[in-house]
Amino acid sequence: MRYIFKFPDIGEGLEEGTIVEWHVEKGQTVQMGDPLCTMETDKVVTAIPSPKNGIIAAKFGKVGETVHVGSALVEIDIEGVEGSAAVDEANKVEPLEEGAGVVGTLEVAGNNAVLVASKEGVRSEEKNNTVGKKALSTPVARAIAHDMGVDINRIKGSGPAGRVTKDDVILFAKDGNKQTNPAVVSGETNIHALQPNLVDTEPLSQMRKTIAKNMIQSKHNAAHMTVFEEVEISELDRIRKKYKEPLAAEGIKLTYLAFIVKATAMSLKKFRALNSEMDFDKGVMLYKKYYNIGIAIDTEKGLVVPVIRNADKLSVKEIAVEINKISDKARDGKLTLEDMKDGTFTLTSYGSIGGLFAVPVINYPQAAILGIGRVSKRPVVKDDELTVGLVLPLSLSVDHRIADGGDTARFVNSIMGYLADPVSLIME
């Protein structure tokens, strides 16, 4: 009996994913827990495991296509399960093997279904079904059809279940069946259609969609206020250099960031408003007694924010180890949802690339985010004498609904105190 396995809800409010790679082919035997494909969601890149033992009868979707939660991924031929037993088996919801990562369900077509052969494989369709007015299509195909002035509902799709693909739209347009002139859309001249070589069009990645959504959500829901400060860190630099080489021999890269994470976690314990969030609908504040520091990391695909858990309980060396781990996972695209869950405060270090000050956008619903600028040598006054110092710029954005100006300034001063006198990080 053949069953359709649909893209499961893997949590965190994800609604869709993009197929990065297929790990199976039609006719291949799979065991429960074997990876079927790798999907890029708006948070992570993760493998989708098979929920059952069987043979792949059909695959739905090509590499690069977006698949919504609940849409078919594969059809699995399960041997030895027939008739009413097959229906009972299909309606079961079973967890996958430990470590598989998601919980999936198998779904079987209804009593009126027949198996229809297609060049993409076998699919289930209802008898006597009628074609609706709105075409089934990929988001990319719909966007291209809009740009080209093509009525996508007039196109016969070649994809799974008659889905209209990008190639279908392009072929339809080439055949001269365009609804309107592609250079004229909604009565306005489209210069990019007249001169297509001027613009490269690429679909938004899942990560970029989420970044955009989160930025808008933060700006709409938090009252941003930003303060700027500078701290002289010559003593911190001296200590870092002293331990840099011995730790490098252990494979540990010691950066300023490890000290800043520790200083931030210890300061958060003194100013609980900065480690909280507001539940406005319920009329309550949530003051968190754990200190999970998110680190914004720049990757080729966009910004990700993995979390260092219980940073207040870790030494600077242990924090450096954790930073190394999450940085490597981020660059290799191996972060999991667990790596990025439940952060209470966020650091963003743009100074390593360039920039002194910024106005960081709060990682909503957190209360604040600390921006770290470029370290540079500057003239400073020490003991009433002018000398050369090492200056670190800081930019702290807070939700002014939660944190008042006084607490905000005192919190920044606390961080600066620890960084100016790093020995104090081990004295409390």
Image (cartoon, rainbow, N blue to C red):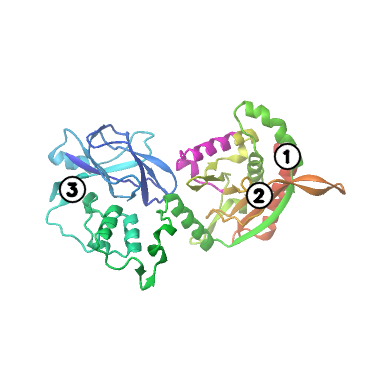
Front: mark 2 or 1: 2
Instruction: Point out residue 38 in the picture as x, y percentages from the top left corner.
Output: 36, 40
Instruction: Point out residue 285 in the picture as x, y percentages from the top left corner.
Output: 55, 56
Q: Mark 2 sits on what residue? A: 373
- The amino acid beneath tag 3 is Ser
- The amino acid beneath tag 1 is Leu
- Depicted 249 relative to depicted 166: above or below: above
Q: Mark 3 sits on what residue? A: 124
Residue that appears at 49% across and 41% down: 339
- When asked about the image quadrant of residue 185, the answer is bottom left
Residue sticking out furthest to the right: 384
Q: Distance between the residues labelled 1 and 3?
A: 66 Å
Numbered marks: total: 3
Q: Earlier in the sequence, mark 2 or mark 1?
A: 1
Instruction: Point out residue 325 in the picture as x, y percentages from the top left corner.
Output: 54, 35
Residue that appears at 63% across and 33% down: 317
Residue that appears at 58% across and 62% down: 223
> On the rendered image, what quadrant is the C terminus found in?
top right
Give the SS element for disc 2: loop
Local packing at callout 3 (Cα closer than 10 Å; few below 14, some 14-19, many 20+) is some
The span shown in magenta is 321-344
As drawn, the label of residue 236 is 1
Q: Nearer the viewer, residue 361 or 110?
A: 361
Give the SS element for disc 3: strand
The answer to whether residue 84 is magenta is no
Front: mark 3 or 2: 2
Q: Nearer the viewer, residue 351 or 14?
A: 351
Q: Earlier in the sequence, mark 1 or mark 3?
A: 3
